[in-house]
Amino acid sequence: MIATMLVDIDHLLADPIYSPNRCSINFHILHSYYAMGVYVVLFYFKKFRIISVGLLFHLFTDFIDCLFMK
């Protein structure tokens, strides 16, 4: 589950890399709605289920951050 935090590597492609007022959801490639769909599909394969849960939980926590941004 901790390894799923590597999904944040797509932040390195953004300019600037970190912006405190930017919502990650649907801004970064691995945080897009298309990627979420792939993560949901991965959930149905037993071999990838724990990875999928970790990725979806990561996106869920990023979404919560978006709700409480200034």
Image (spheres, rainbow, N blue to C red):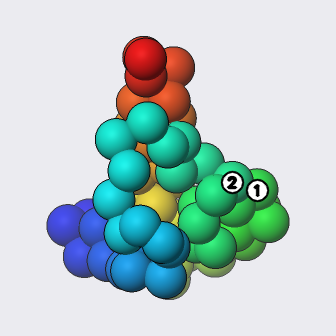
* Earlier residue among tags 2 and 1: 2
Task: Residue type at mark 1: give it.
Answer: Tyr
In this orientation, which residue lies closer to the viewer: 7 or 51? Answer: 7
Mark 1 crowd level (few <14, some 14–19, many ≥20, 10 Å Cα): some
Instruction: Answer left or right for 11 relative to 3.
Output: right
Whether tag 2 and tag 1 are in contact, CB under 8 A, the answer is yes
Which picture quadrant has residue 30?
A: bottom right
Q: Position of residue 28 (x, y in %)?
A: 59, 66
Q: Residues within 10 Å of mark 2 (few under 14, many from 20)?
A: some
To which residue does mark 1 refer?
33
The residue that appears at 34% across and 41% down in the rendered structure is 20
> In which quadrant will I find the N terminus?
bottom left
Judge by depth and name the residue closer to the eye, 13 or 47: 13
Determine the secondary structure under disc 1: helix
- Assign the C terminus to one quadrant of the image: top left
Residue 39 seen by the camera: no
Instruction: Say if 10 sits above or below 59 in the image.
Output: below
Which label sits on residue 26?
2
| Residue at left offset 69%, top offset 54% | 26
* Element on which disc 2 rests: loop
Q: Residue at x 79, y 65 (%)?
A: 34
> Callout 2, which amino acid?
Asn
